[in-house]
Structure formats: C-alpha cells, structure tokens
Image: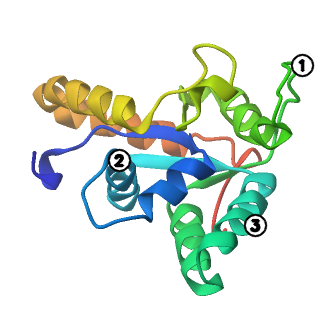
Amino acid sequence: MEDKEFIVVAFAVIDTNVVISSMLGNKRSATKEIFHFIKNGNIIPLYDRRILGEYKEVLERFFTEDISSEKISEIVEHGYLVTDIKETREYFADKTDIPFFEVKESSKELDAYLITGNTKHYPENSTRTAAFVIDVMQYLNRFVLKDKEKYLQDIKERIEHLDSEKYVKAGR
C-alpha cells in the first residue's frame, strides 16, 4: 500500500521494547513499520515524563546517547505529552510497566493503543502487538478510503479539540 493512500490515524503508547526492536536489524518488521507510521503521522505517540526517562535509560544501554536522543526526539516531535495521569490500582510485577499502562488508561477518550512485545506484563486485553496494530490500521484504511474527506476532518477536529492542558505538543 502506498503511503499517500494510507490515512488511518491512531494514538498509541509505545513500550520501550518496541522502540528498541525498531532500531535493530535491517529487515522490515512490524516495529519498524510502527515508526514509519509515526513519521507519516498515521500513529501519534502518547507519553509522559516517566516514559521518556525509561526510554533514555534503556536505550542508552544499547545505543549511543546521540542515537538514543534521536529516537526519543522522533517520538516527542510526533506525539503528545500526557499530563493528567490517573494512578492505576492494577498489580504489576515489573513496576517499570506502570507508566505505559497509566498513560494508555488516562487517554481512553483517544482510544489509544498500548503497543508492546510483552503483552503478558499487562492486564488482559489492555495491549496490542505492533503487528496487530498495523493489521487493524490496514484493514480500517480500506474502509476509510471510501469517505476519506470526512474521516480526515474528524481526525483534524479531534486533534484540534484535545485538552491542551492534558495533551501537550512539543514546542508549545
């Protein structure tokens, strides 16, 4: 499918393992595709300061500071900082997973995905894999193309009416 025909837009919280996986190897993969869609505006990342801190800490274990910063900047440039976070009462064996879940749950009005390679780390039915998200977006894209103008107007209005206190765009 050509990029210019791909118009579906989804909001998503991106787990660190997906970010790392997208940076490994030269072969095409679902995680690389997620970042392709982020650059094209088809996926809009959601994050908070805790998530950015984890990205930095974990990425710098595997990559140089420059490469890590570049990847984090890509997420920040194309996404929104979520400031109104509701604390979860869910139990997490790995406490570093909590921010990702809380940002996703705090963004319910956007129907946000939590994209991870570790679906078992989160409550049942709260996450999606990169491949699943891409499959759903491609499936929906076939139907959206029939009424592209209305869909794009709906997305534009949704983004224009985001609570600017809760969803902060970089550079504002």
Q: Residues within 10 Å of mark 3 (few under 14, many from 20)?
A: few
Question: From the viewer's perspective, is residue 158 above or below residue 44?
Answer: above
Which amino acid type corresponds to the residue marked 1 in the rendered image? Arg
> How far is the residue under mark 1 from the one under mark 2?
31 Å
- Mark 2 nearby-residue class (10 Å; few <14, some 14–19, many ≥20): many
Q: Nearer the viewer, residue 111 or 54?
A: 54
Q: Judging from the image, what secondary structure is the residue with disc 1 in? A: loop
Which labelled disc corresponds to residue 42? Answer: 2
| Foreground of the two, 152 or 87 | 87
In the drawing, does residue 62 fall left or right of residue 54?
A: left
Q: Is residue 128 above or below residue 85?
A: above
Work out whether residue 49 or residue 20 is closer to the camera in this orientation and state it. 20
Q: Earlier in the sequence, mark 1 or mark 2?
A: 2
Which residue matches tag 3? 57
Residue 156 is tagged as none
Mark 3 or 2: in front is 3
> At 61% from the left edge and 71% from the top edge, which residue is drawn?
62
Q: Looking at the image, tell me whether mark 3 or mark 1 is earlier in sequence order.
A: 3
Q: Between marks 3 and 1, how big is the CA–CA gap?
A: 25 Å
Quarter of the view holding residue 32: bottom left
The quarter of the rendered structure image containing the C terminus is bottom right
Q: Position of residue 61 (x, y in %)?
A: 69, 71
Residue 71 visible in rendering: yes
Residue 48 at x, y percent in the picture: 75, 51
Q: Which residue is mark 1?
A: 89
Q: Tell me the residue at 58%/76% (across/down).
A: 63
Please tell me whether mark 3 sits on a helix, a strand or a loop. Answer: helix
Image location (x, y in percent) of residue 163? 68, 41
Q: How many marks?
A: 3
